[in-house]
Amino acid sequence: MTPDWQSKDGQKNPDARRSAQSVWGSRPDQPEIAVRNSARAENILRVVLQLLVMATGLGLTAAFALTPLPKPEASTAVEAGKSAPFVGAWSVSMPTMEVGTPDTDYAICTLPVRIEAANETHIFYLGPRTSKPTPRWN
């Protein structure tokens, strides 16, 4: 039986030999092919490591994004359960996080939200256009 890179009349065909080697991989007697396969393995390993690092980075980013913020400590300047510190006229706005987009104002200084004390621990909320108090119980 003749090798696939040699014709039946005994003539060597180098093109057929190269194609057979590319199909079957490196041969021990051909070090340049082994070097090419080694470089290919290094490239594959490099890509796998890059993908692993990216997946780890994305996973950690998602974990940090889902981590709850620490609970703020209660202020000692305001007594808990007392309505007096909140009584008055308030402006209310919602800041936007986009540059060039103005904040949304829900109540402004000329039409403020008013909070009145119902008793020592409860408040009444009056919106910018509300004249009758709406109780907000704790």
Image (spheres, grey):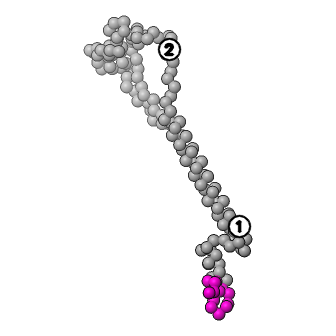
* Residue 43: percent from left, percent from top: 64, 60
12 or 92: which is nearer to us? 12
Q: Secondary structure at mark 1?
A: helix
| Mark 1 residue type | Val
Residue extending farthest to the bottom is 9
Q: Is residue 108 left or right of residue 29?
A: left
37 or 93: which is nearer to us? 37
Q: Is residue 52 left or right of residue 34?
A: left
Query: In which quadrant will I find the C terminus?
Result: top left
Q: Is residue 14 above or below residue 47?
A: below
Residue 13 visible, this angle: yes
31 or 57: which is nearer to us? 31
Instruction: Tell us which disc is closer to us: 1 or 2.
Output: 1
Name the chief secondary structure element in magenta: loop
Q: Is residue 33 above or below residue 115?
A: below
Q: Give whichever of discs 1 and 2 has the lower sequence position.
A: 1
The image quarter containing residue 102 is top left
Q: Which residue, given by chain and number where applicable, does mark 2 sit on?
A: 75
Task: Tell me the magenta residue range.
Answer: 1-13
Q: Residue at 68% across / 87% down in the picture?
A: 12
* Residue 105: percent from left, percent from top: 40, 27
Q: Residue at 26% across / 14% down in the picture?
A: 132
* Residue 54: percent from left, percent from top: 57, 48
